[in-house]
């Protein structure tokens, strides 16, 4: 609907129709509601045409009253007819909004229609928005277009000149039409230049700073790779000649403490396998008696080369073997037969202590600093063998304490490799303390029999005294002797023990059975347990027979024959006195192999009904006492022979099935959590067994794990496996 200023509203309505005609018309409209030109649309168009016609006729009437020349801008005329429109908000006249149209004469000739110049006005209103028509059907999807080509940009440095006086960068862009990933000359569409500005004048020179301290020279050293790790390679050391730690500054030598970084490169695979063939050919260089190994910066071991017998050998840092000394010129000295080989940090450096027989003085204790001239017998303690099967050795006060037994009876000694003396006259004891000890020792026999252990507080040992029998004793660091009469009516016969805070826990007899007792530093004691066999009142009689006693924090873990004939694991809390069996299904713990611990977990060999002899572990709790891994699934036993814990990994010499399902025989395995990996099998193939660990034990050096095995060509000889922490330091180019 349209309205004009000064006129009434004009409506254009359709002609009158009867009801019949109306119904017929409505029906016809319903049938044709989807047609584009419906009668309703025609009516609307007719209304609009009539209103617009009226508007134009009104405008034409005004024009007729003016000179025809006024409709155009004619030179010399003073006025012109102007038409202006102005938007109109929705109001009572135009509910949907619209526009005001003003018509008048521009009498002042400013090109604008002022209020007093308006002669005619009208309103044009928007009609009401109609309802949306029905939605049409979706058209078919068109075909996918082709992928466009990539846009490429080239950056080129410009030398000073044209177009950049002081140099700059040329930026070219375009489309890679030939898809060769290069912006070719014919593909360049735009080129722009970013020019450098002119350099400013140099500023004034600043004041001279104070001289710094004298610096140190940077040094680089190149070495051949150690052949024990890399057969062909180099090691580059980078450092500063600044005298760090024990080094000497500005001496032109890059010493170990001055090294800051190292680069280790190998041109072939890092070496693992046979160290050397001690006894040439398929004959064995190692046996059950001749296979003791001890390590520090160097490795000392006993081996038989088939010519000189079982003697003392050494491996240097490059794993180069050398017989250190032929102690028994006409036979076998068999180093370490009874006591093994012990390494101790003494006041004069590292020393190795071992027993040996030179064929003249019998079996005595020897010491070595790793050189042939520094390998000597400590003394002829007895006319025959001073060291036998019942001898003991332990580390104490920067040396070793060991026992001898011969024609002069059972005696105990201390030595640091330079000084060897009776324990009663140790060099740091006062004269009065030594005198008292000598007097007290007159009534003491069987010294160290079955138990001898030194710790930071003193020396604990078993001995027999004429008044109290076979009991525990302790010499403190000042030379005072304490005796513990655990069994007033007989011998307590101590066997196993472990140092604890404030004292020592030992397995001993209380007169009815064997229990745990805690010994205090001042001579007092208390019984910790009163265990009886399952379902009886009979005290336990076999405690710590194989596994022994191990300490995990404030908990003691030990084995007990609690039911039947097989031992099981128990724990005892030093904090609250709680005693409990850790597992009834894991039996014979530590039966064949010495357990190993990292301070939180203990690993040991064990037997379960459905697994045979395998690897188990405990953290001192019931939940944490479990099978670690079943290397030989089913009742077949993996028969672990030796453990080592190094680089946060448990290693074991045992039998198992490899990834292909083949029995590896006894080989080297690593255990991570409850998963096992075969690391080194020196004699591969179905039915081949290297029998690793039959002789000797698994020993960790600074670079390797060493063990004795048979590779099928050289007999039982020494083999090496490179530790993971060392392997990670090398770059291998092969």
Image (cartoon, helix red, strand yellow):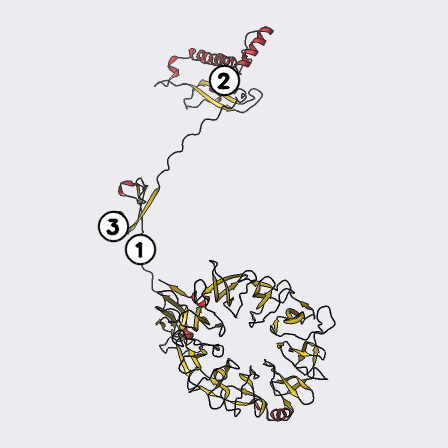
- Mark number, residue 161: 3
- Mark number, residue 199: 1
Quadrant into which the C terminus falls: bottom left
Estimate the spatial distance between the alpha carbons at disc 1 and disc 2, rounded to whole Å. 71 Å
Count neighbours of disc 2 (C-alpha within 10 A) and say few if under 14, some if 14 to 19, many if 20 or more.
some
Q: Position of residue 19 (x, y in %)?
A: 60, 7
Is tag 3's residue or tag 1's residue first in the polypeptide sequence? Answer: 3
Foreground disc of the pair 3, 1: 3
User: Dot 1: what SS?
Assistant: loop
User: Dot 2: what SS?
Assistant: strand
- Mark number, residue 481: none
Please give the name of the residue rendered at 47% of the width and 22% of the height, measured from the top-left corner: 85
Please give the name of the residue rendered at 62% of the width and 70% of the height, measured from the top-left corner: 553
Front-most of 551 and 321? 321
Q: Position of residue 229 (x, y in %)?
A: 40, 69
Count neighbours of disc 3 (C-alpha within 10 A) and say few if under 14, some if 14 to 19, many if 20 or more.
few
Foreground disc of the pair 1, 2: 1
């Amino acid at each position: 609907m349209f309205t004009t200023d000064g006129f009434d509203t004009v409506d254009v309505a359709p002609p009158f129709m009867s009801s019949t005609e109306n119904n017929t018309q409505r029906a016809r409209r319903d049938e044709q509601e989807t047609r584009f030109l419906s009668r309703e649309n025609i009516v609307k168009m007719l209304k609009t045409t009539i209103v617009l016609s009226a508007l134009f006729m009104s405008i034409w009437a005004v024009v007729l009253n003016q000179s025809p020349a006024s409709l155009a801008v004619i030179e010399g005329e003073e006025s012109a007819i102007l038409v202006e429109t102005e938007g109109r908000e929705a109001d009572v006249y135009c509910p949907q909004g619209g526009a005001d149209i003003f018509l008048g004469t521009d009498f002042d000739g400013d090109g604008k229609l002022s209020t007093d110049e308006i002669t005619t006005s009208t309103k044009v209103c928007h009609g009401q928005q109609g309802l949306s028509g029905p939605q049409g059907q979706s058209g078919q999807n068109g075909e996918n277009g082709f992928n466009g080509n990539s846009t490429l940009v080239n950056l080129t440095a410009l030398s000073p000149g044209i177009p950049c006086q002081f140099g700059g960068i040329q930026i070219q862009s375009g489309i890679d039409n030939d898809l060769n990933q290069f912006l070719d000359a014919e593909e360049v569409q735009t080129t722009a230049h970013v020019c450098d500005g002119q350099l400013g004048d140099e500023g004034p020179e600043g004041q001279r700073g104070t001289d710094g301290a004298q610096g140190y020279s940077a040094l680089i050293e190149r070495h051949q790779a150690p052949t024990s790790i890399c057969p062909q390679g180099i090691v580059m050391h980078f450092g500063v000649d600044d005298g760090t730690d024990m080094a000497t500054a500005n001496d032109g030598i890059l010493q170990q403490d001055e090294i800051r970084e190292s680069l280790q490169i190998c041109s072939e695979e890092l070496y693992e396998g046979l160290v050397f063939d001690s006894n040439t050919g398929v004959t064995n260089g190692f046996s059950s008696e001749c296979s003791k190994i001890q390590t520090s910066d160097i490795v000392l071991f006993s081996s038989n080369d088939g010519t000189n017998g079982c003697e003392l050998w050494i491996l240097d840092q490059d794993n180069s073997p050398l017989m250190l000394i032929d102690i028994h010129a006409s036979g076998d000295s068999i180093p370490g037969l009874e006591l093994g080989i012990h390494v101790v940090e003494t006041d004069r450096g590292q020393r190795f202590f071992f027993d040996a027989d030179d064929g003249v003085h019998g079996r005595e204790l020897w010491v070595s600093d790793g050189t042939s001239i520094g390998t000597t017998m400590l003394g002829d303690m007895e006319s025959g063998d001073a060291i036998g099967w019942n001898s003991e050795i332990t580390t104490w006060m920067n040396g070793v304490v060991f026992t001898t037994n011969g024609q002069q009876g059972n005696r105990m000694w201390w030595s640091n490799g330079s000084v060897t003396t009776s324990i009663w006259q140790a060099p740091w004891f006062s004269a009065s303390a030594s005198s008292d000890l000598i007097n007290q020792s007159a009534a003491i026999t069987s010294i160290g029999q079955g138990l001898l252990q030194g710790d930071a507080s003193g020396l604990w040992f078993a001995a027999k005294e004429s008044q109290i029998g076979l009991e525990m004793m302790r010499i403190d660091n000042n030379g005072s002797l304490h005796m513990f009469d655990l069994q007033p009516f007989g011998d307590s016969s101590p066997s196993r023990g472990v140092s604890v805070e404030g004292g020592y826990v030992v397995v001993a007899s209380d007169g009815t059975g064997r229990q745990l007792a805690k010994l205090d530093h001042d001579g007092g004691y208390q019984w910790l347990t009163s265990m009886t066999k399952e379902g009886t009142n009979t005290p336990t009689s076999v405690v710590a027979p194989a596994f022994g006693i191990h300490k995990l924090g404030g908990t003691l873990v030990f084995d007990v024959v609690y039911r039947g004939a097989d031992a099981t694991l128990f724990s005892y809390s030093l904090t609250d006195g709680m005693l409990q069996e850790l597992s009834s299904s894991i039996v014979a713990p530590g039966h064949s192999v010495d357990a190993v611990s990292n301070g939180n977990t203990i690993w040991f060999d064990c037997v379960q009904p459905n697994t045979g002899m395998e690897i188990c572990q405990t953290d001192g709790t019931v939940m944490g006492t479990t099978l670690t891994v079943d290397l030989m699934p089913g009742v077949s036993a993996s028969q672990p022979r030796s453990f080592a814990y190094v680089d946060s990994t448990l290693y074991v010499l045992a039998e198992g099935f490899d990834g292909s399902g083949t029995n590896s025989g006894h080989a080297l395995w690593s255990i991570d959590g409850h998963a096992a990996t075969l690391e080194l099998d020196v004699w591969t193939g179905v039915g081949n067994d290297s029998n690793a660990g039959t002789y000797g034990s698994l020993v960790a050096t600074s670079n390797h794990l060493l063990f004795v095995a048979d590779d099928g060509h050289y007999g039982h000889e020494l083999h090496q496996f490179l530790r993971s922490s060392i392997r990670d330091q090398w770059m291998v180019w092969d």
